[in-house]
Image (spheres, rainbow, N blue to C red):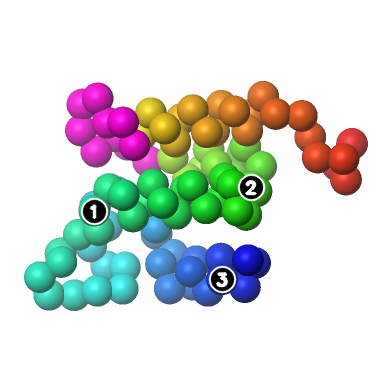
């Protein structure tokens, strides 16, 4: 998983920015849809367990009022903030 995440970060260095237009595509798709950042944030939280401070650095502004994706990212960040430290860090 680490190799895949590292490759993704190199291809999309600004993945957490909603509406980013210069990721990996050009032409018709002038911005990334909001679920692109949500899915990458989900991977960062669950498959590549990042500490809460890294998750906080990857929070962007809401896409619109009542942005459910932003609320989900805030909830996952708060959950990571309140989670006990892994055994290796204790």
Q: Residues within 10 Å of mark 3 (few under 14, many from 20)?
A: few
On screen, residue 46 versus residue 39, left or right, reads right
Q: CA distance from mark 3 to mark 2?
A: 15 Å
Instruction: Determine the secondary structure under disc 3.
Output: helix
Residue 2: percent from left, percent from top:
65, 67
> Of callouts 3 and 1, which one flags the residue occurring earlier in the amino acid sequence?
3
Q: Say which quadrant the N terminus sits in.
A: bottom right
Residue at numbered disc 2? 50
On the question of residue 16 being in view, the answer is no
> Of callouts 2 and 1, which one flags the residue occurring earlier in the amino acid sequence?
1
Residue contact between numbered discs 3 and 1, judged by CB atoms under 8 Å: no
Q: Residue at x 59, y 28 (%)?
A: 79
Q: Residue at x 49, y 47 (%)?
A: 42
User: Which of 26/43 is in front?
Assistant: 43
Say the numbered circle drawn on residue 4: 3
On screen, residue 81 versus residue 43, left or right, reads right
Residue at numbered disc 1? 33
Start-end of magenta stretch:
60-69
On screen, residue 18 versus residue 71, left or right, reads left
């Amino acid at each position: 998983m680490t190799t895949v995440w590292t490759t993704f970060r190199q291809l999309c260095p600004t993945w957490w920015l909603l509406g980013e237009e210069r990721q990996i595509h050009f032409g018709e798709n002038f911005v990334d849809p909001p679920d692109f950042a949500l899915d990458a944030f989900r991977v960062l939280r669950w498959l590549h367990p990042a500490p809460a401070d890294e998750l906080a650095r990857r929070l962007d502004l809401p896409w619109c009022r009542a942005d459910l994706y932003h609320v989900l990212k805030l909830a996952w960040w708060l959950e990571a903030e309140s989670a006990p430290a892994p055994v290796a860090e204790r």
